[in-house]
Image (spheres, helix red, strand yellow):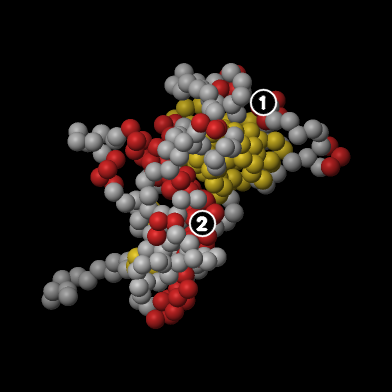
Amino acid sequence: MAEAGKAVYNLPMYINAAVGAFGAWRGPVPDEIFCSGEPVPKVLDIYKWVTPHIDLIAPDIYTPNSTSYEAECAVYARDDNPLFLPESGHGGCHIWNSFRALANYNLTGYFFFGSEAIVAEDGSVRPEGKNLVDTFRCAAAVIPLLLKYQGTGKVHAVVQEDYTVQQWIAFDGYLGRIQFGAGRMGGGASKDWRHSGGQFTPREQAPDTNRGRGLVFQTSKNEFYLVGANYRLFLRPKYSPDKKQPLVFHDNNVRGRQFSIDEGHFDQKGKFVVDRRRNGDNISNGLWVEPDIGVLRVRTCD
């Protein structure tokens, strides 16, 4: 109860739903297996009808695979129910699936269970928590873009699945190939003096390793913003049928169309600030990103 004479604040209110506990399934959509009376998918419409004072119903998602994860997101991401995850895992698939939720289901917020577990006694981040911290850093770096472009089809998730080395994305006017890890040849592994290339072997990749993940925004036909870790993007213009050539991706397909490639960040007003201009060999082997570079802006020309 508010005390007399004191202001009353309208704070967001939500109901926490522990759906699909521990990845358990009982049908085509996740269903609760032990908590009675919660807003599980089967009764979500009823809950929304009888609780108009509740701002949103927020699911806990611990589902371990991407198909199940997206199915749960799709159930709760509705016009009358913005998607917010008040509890999820802090390792493995939960890290990279969060980018799917941001790009495809307009995720508004994410919190993981056991946040104290990633911090050592001296306040530093434990090694096993680095990938999670990097993921949050990447998402936070593009909040101005998320606020502007979520729901427009201009936000694309980059997620490395088990035993995969690449991903394809169809952009407006361009076809993009995402290459994960260092690549198959030594030249493709080079980035710059701050980052060693390393070598990626997909069948040795465990759930908690540094999988490729992130977001790509196409804000106009000739402007892209990239953020994430352990991947690089190759672009190729979409040619008309009479001009198509063999589908080969190498540096010459995009280098001549790259007008500028800049590492930077967004200021408090949402304006992109250039911190470092890339050129020379740093642009010859794809448009690569790592969490410590901030946001990569790419401008092309026809």
Q: Is residue 190 visible?
A: yes
On screen, 4 above or below 163? below
Question: Which is closer to the viewer, label 1 or label 2?
Answer: 2
Q: Residues within 10 Å of mark 2 (few under 14, many from 20)?
A: many
Residue topped by disc 2: 68
On screen, 19 above or below 285? below
* Numbered disc 1: secondary structure: loop
- Check the image and name the residue furthest to the right: 242
Residue topped by disc 1: 251
Residue type for callout 2 = Ser
Q: Residue 221 at what x, y percent from top left?
A: 65, 44
Return the residue nearer the eye: 22 or 6.
22
Image point 60% across, 19% down: which residue? 187
On screen, 74 above or below 263? below
Image point 61% across, 21% down: which residue? 185
Sequence-wise, the earlier of marks 1 and 2 is 2
Image point 41% across, 63% down: which residue? 19
89 relative position to 151: left or right? left
Residue type for callout 1 = Asp
